[in-house]
Image: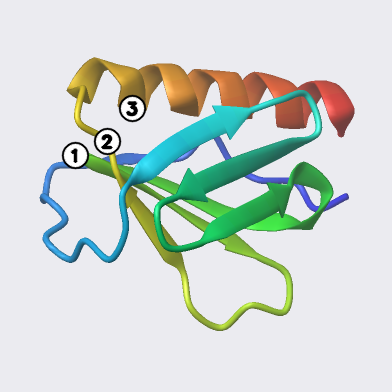
Amino acid sequence: MAKISKGRKVVDTYNEVTDSGYLYITSKKVTFVGSKKNLTYPFNKLINFTKFADAVEFQKENEKRVKSFLVSDEYSIDEIGAIIFAVTNQNG
């Protein structure tokens, strides 16, 4: 499994929104259930995670484009980062 870092919070805001929906985090993966598309990021395939002031980005192995997800509650971004960091370090 690839090791990912805790992530870093970027002060910039993210402006491009292509879908809206819900982000679910389990002990094995992150899943986005959107109105247009559903995406799954297994933690063992996740190579990059970045926190922005209003969004989070994920990139998995063999994926050229990073996927960004706008988060409406800025406090949730830190919680998402903490959960992903804890789960990936526990599984790694």
Q: Earlier in the sequence, mark 2 or mark 3?
A: 2
- Label 2 with label 3: CB-CB less than 8 Å: yes
Query: From this viewpoint, which residue is outermost toward the bottom?
Result: 64
Q: Which mark is residue 31?
A: none
Residue sitting at x 61%, y 42% = 31
Residue at (42%, 62%) from the top-left corner?
36
Q: Residues within 10 Å of mark 2 (few under 14, many from 20)?
A: many
Circle 2 SS class? loop
Q: Position of residue 44 (x, y in %)?
A: 83, 49
Q: Are marks 1 and 3 in contact (CB under 8 Å)?
A: yes
Select label 2 or label 3 by which is in front: 2
Regarding mark 1 in the picture, which secondary structure is present there?
A: loop
Contact (CB < 8 A) between labels 2 and 1?
A: yes
Q: Read off the residue under disc 2.
A: 71
Q: Nearer the viewer, residue 72 or 9?
A: 72
Q: Which residue is mark 3?
A: 77
For the residues labelled 2 and 3, the Cα–Cα distance comes to 7 Å
Quadrant including the C terminus: top right
How far from the left and from the top, in percent, is residue 39?
60, 57
Which comes sooner in the sequence, label 1 or label 3? 1
Residue 10 vertical placement versus 45 (above, below): above
Q: With 13 as the anchor, is 31 left or right in this view?
A: right
Residue at image x 19%, y 39%? Answer: 54
Q: Quadrant of residue 46?
A: bottom right
- Of the residues under marks 2 and 1, which one precedes in the sequence? 1
Badge 1, how many Cα within 10 Å: few under 14, some, many 20+? many
Q: CA distance from mark 1 to mark 3?
A: 7 Å
Q: Which residue is mark 1?
A: 54
